[in-house]
Image (tube, rainbow, N blue to C red):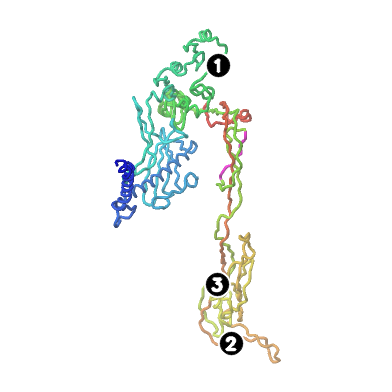
Amino acid sequence: MYTEEYEKRGFPIGNFLAKLILVAVFALLLVWFVPKYLSPVVKTDTRTTCAGSTCDTAGIKALTSQIFAENMERMKDAAISYYTDERLPQEVGQSKKMTLADMIGEKIIVPLIDKNNKAVDVDKSYVQITKANDEYILKVNLKDSETEDYILVHLGCYTYCDSYICEKRPSTVGTKSAISSTVPIKGSISDGTYYAPTIVVPVVTPTEHKACMYDSYTGKFYDAYGNSTSKLNYLKSCLKPVCKKVSGYYFDKNGNNVSYSEYERSCSQGHITETYYCEKVNGYYYDKNGNRVSYEQYKKSCGVAPEETKYICKIVNGDYYDSEGNKVSKVEYIKNCKKPICEKISGYYFGLDGDVVSEAQFNKECGTPTPPPEPEWLYEYSKTTGAEFSAWTKWSDWSKTNCATQVINCSDTDITCLKKLQLYKRKEKIGTYQNTYSKTREQIVQTGSYTQKACNNYQYIEINRKLYVTTKTYTQVNTITKATTHTTGSWTYNGRGSYANPPRDSGNTRYIFVGADYSYCNDTCTSLPNYYYDSYTYSAGMESVSSTTTPGSVNIDTSSDVYTQTSYEARCGGYTVKTIPIYGTITVTEKATRTEPLYGDVCYQSTKTRTIIDEGSTKYKWSTYNDTTLLNNGWHYTGNKRQK
């Protein structure tokens, strides 16, 4: 009976699991649906009011601040990558500036868009780098549609740089354990406020950082425990040499520093091969394992710059260094390195003791100063042998360039020849301009008038100081324009003609300028075009007379059988006071203007490049300028020079 009842009920654990699954599903549905009806609606809106919802204005502010900061960061990174050694200002206080428009033109950055989806101001946004005493200050100024701000970035050539210069990191000194310092890079948002997030830069203890290293800046060696020690102890602790000559020291079979004779007895060596560690010898770099490596590998292995960075009696980037490598003033440099006695150098007077004195004291001690001799210079040459190069790339497609671009056509055997550039120049249409053509001609115009007693039956005019009598009004000539083109008054229209040389007006002929005839030209005229003129002829009688009271002669029909003379004096019909117009010939300039194409030089460049696979070995020599013996044998200038 117990068994039958058990079988009817079913297995209790399975029933429990089924109920548990139903409860879990119901709980998940509650978690999914309930927040949708209970949580407030959040809108991202830049307006001041949000009806029926909660505005996430903090998020908007944070987002816009982030966009502004990221645009500034892009300008900063582009500027750091652009300002290589040859582009940096050389003198202390000197600055170089590029607008955002210049940066876009140099193809080192693309146009920037601000938070309002508008282009950043390319003229008022700029970067400016200034040389300080020991570093460079980069100012990054950004102006968008609403905001303008700037940052100052300290740049220099530090041991942790991957390129020539990089951004300066804050330094934190630890004594017992590793500490972290932070350097802000790009923007982030927290609680609606923009913050510059940081990257963590580990700053290790001296023991971890300087174990088995040589620091050329301080001249100190560090043993395997990171403690400052002598060079000999550094070699013994870190290299543990046995039967070797290392950096001028001999070590026997037990690793002890001994004399050469003791070394011979202990090691039974004949010819000794010198081994160098973290040193530059004869132009070659050696890493901490004694292998000859490149300069970059040397830095990675040894962690420091070579000893040659210490300048002795040199002028470097406008700074002066004395005989101990200390940076000093110009006067101290001259006194320490040149040791002048009774000399005038760079505007300074040096007396009998080599001290700077006044001009009067100088003349008293030394007499009248003689001009210093012209300095003689030596120039550094280098020659690289055994270098291997990759194959040249194909010539690039032609692209427009500034016509001031210089052709690069170096020798394939030149170690510095990593790029070649060819230039192509041609005339192209670069725009249009208004070209004006001018011609001069003589034209008759009214220049004045006067009153005079004259015959009633005639009209009188004066042209170029001669008096004429007419039967019709002559003054209608002033009403003729280039729009008339028909007979008017006593002037008969003769039509329009094209003239290579402008016609001259006369007393009874008038020419009105209409325009230029370009049918003899192409897109530009190599000579003046022809000009169109409308011509008019005075159709009435016109005769020269001596005075206004002399009407002139009147012809009669000579075919008549009854006559005693060929002409009779015309009757005046009485006299009256009349206004006599005065006409004179003047020179006028008639111009015609049209839009013509403007042509100019347009230049294109094509380049090809190669890379150095193996740097080979480089030798250096000092010699006089233009040493043809060296230049013809593959030596090249390094750009360095020094006084003899």
Looking at the image, residue 51 lies above or below residue 283: below
Identify the mark nearer the N-term, 2 or 1: 1
Kind of residue indicated by mark 1: Thr
Residue sitting at x 50%, y 24%: 287
Tag 3 residue: 445
Q: Which mark is residue 436?
A: none
Looking at the image, residue 331 lies above or below residue 610: above
Kind of residue indicated by mark 2: Arg
Q: Quadrant of the N terminus?
A: top left
Residue 265 percent across, percent down from the top left = 53, 7
Is residue 368 visible to the viewer in this orientation of the structure? no
Query: Camera-side residue: 338 or 63?
Result: 63
* Magenta stretch, main secondary structure class: loop
Stretch of the chain drawn in magenta = 404-412
Query: Camera-side residue: 443 or 405?
Result: 405
Query: Camera-side residue: 388 or 180?
Result: 180
Identify the mark nearer the N-term, 3 or 2: 3
Residue sitting at x 34%, y 50%: 60
Residue 458 percent across, percent down from the top left = 56, 83
Looking at the rendered structure, the secondary structure element under dot 2 is loop
Label 1 CA crowd tier, 10 Å (few <14, some 14–19, many 20+): few
The span from disc 2 to disc 1 (Cα, nearest Å) is 139 Å
Looking at the rendered structure, the secondary structure element under dot 1 is loop
Q: How many marks?
A: 3
Kind of residue indicated by mark 3: Val
The span from disc 3 to disc 2 (Cα, nearest Å) is 31 Å
Quadrant position of residue 475:
bottom right
Residue 617 percent across, percent down from the top left = 57, 26
Tag 1 residue: 273
Q: Which mark is residue 571?
A: 2
